[in-house]
Image (cartoon, rainbow, N blue to C red):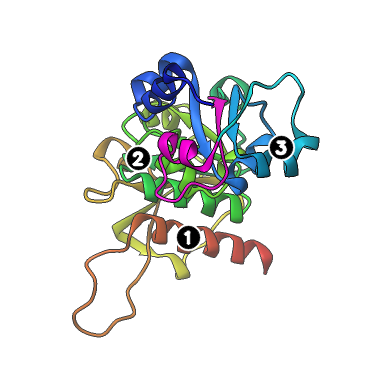
Amino acid sequence: MISKNQFKFIRQLDQKKYRRREGLFVAEGTKVVGDLLLRYQPHSLFATAEWLEANRSILSSSLAMTEVSSDELQRISFQQHPQQVLALFPIPDHAASTAFQPSALSLALDGVQDPGNLGTIIRIADWFGIKTIYCSEDTVDAWNPKVVQATMGSIARINLIYIDLPELLDTLPDSFPVYGTLLDGDDIYQQSLSENGLIIMGNEGNGISEAVRTRINHRLLIPSFSQGDTAESLNVAIATAITCSEFRRRKAT
């Protein structure tokens, strides 16, 4: 049974200010919660009897667990069709535990605003073995319930660091590869791509900001192969997938 205070507490976590104040985020569904349980100890968990019975062996006896009915889960859920379990997890401080890895390939997001796009990009990074994403301070909050859901569990395996991107770029050596996708860039399929570096993806409408653009030393373009009229641009998540795929394809050949 869920109390009124529990209901209010959970629903408040839809807002960034409450997530930051409490240091918690909401995860839902067997896949997302299951993946997060492999890495993080939840603050509390709300699940149907069926889910609790099937997962009892992986749950700590000290965990605050509340058995709920399907109707109760529907009330607290942020999803149209909730899936058996909702859990509250501490927001990890990846910035404190993850040092910049100059030998790795990482992503940076400059002002990405759509929760679905960010969630998909996190999933793409997970697929292509990119462990860290640096987010500008005006990028949508990664712990938004919509973002978490869109990652389909990949958020459990990616380090997400919110940072002043120009300041980060200024700490890098001039020779460090900083890639950016720009309309005036050079055909990605004709350029040399390194195994390490930072790939910057920009805002859905405005692209990469001027402050960040001036610090890019490898300007890339995903060319259109359409004849005549074509789409004006690619969705940022799709562009991220194409770019990461090309980097990894080069590494494999």
Identify residue type, mark 3: Leu
In the picture shown, does residue 115 fall above or below 194? above
Residue 62: percent from the left, percent from the top?
A: 73, 18
Quick one: quadrant of the N terminus?
A: top right
Quick one: quadrant of the C terminus?
A: bottom right
Identify residue type, mark 2: Asp
SS label for mark 2? strand
| Badge 3 or badge 2: first in the primary sequence | 3
| Badge 2 or badge 1: first in the primary sequence | 2
> How far is mark 3 from mark 2, CA to CA?
30 Å
Q: Mark 2 — residue?
A: 110
Residue contact between numbered discs 2 and 1, judged by CB atoms under 8 Å: no
Using a 10 Å C-alpha cutoff, classify the residue at mark 1 as few (fewer than 14 neighbours), some (14 to 19) or many (20 or more). Answer: some
Task: Depth check: give the residue in front, 218 or 88.
Answer: 88
Which residue is the extreme one toward the right? 57
Task: Depth check: give the residue in front, 70 or 231.
Answer: 70
Q: Which mark is residue 241?
A: 1
Residue 127: percent from the left, percent from the top?
A: 60, 55
Residue 99: percent from the left, percent from the top?
A: 61, 27
> How far is mark 2 from mark 1, CA to CA?
16 Å
Task: Depth check: give the residue in front, 252 or 19.
Answer: 19
218 to the left or right of 57 = left
Front label number (3 vs 1): 3
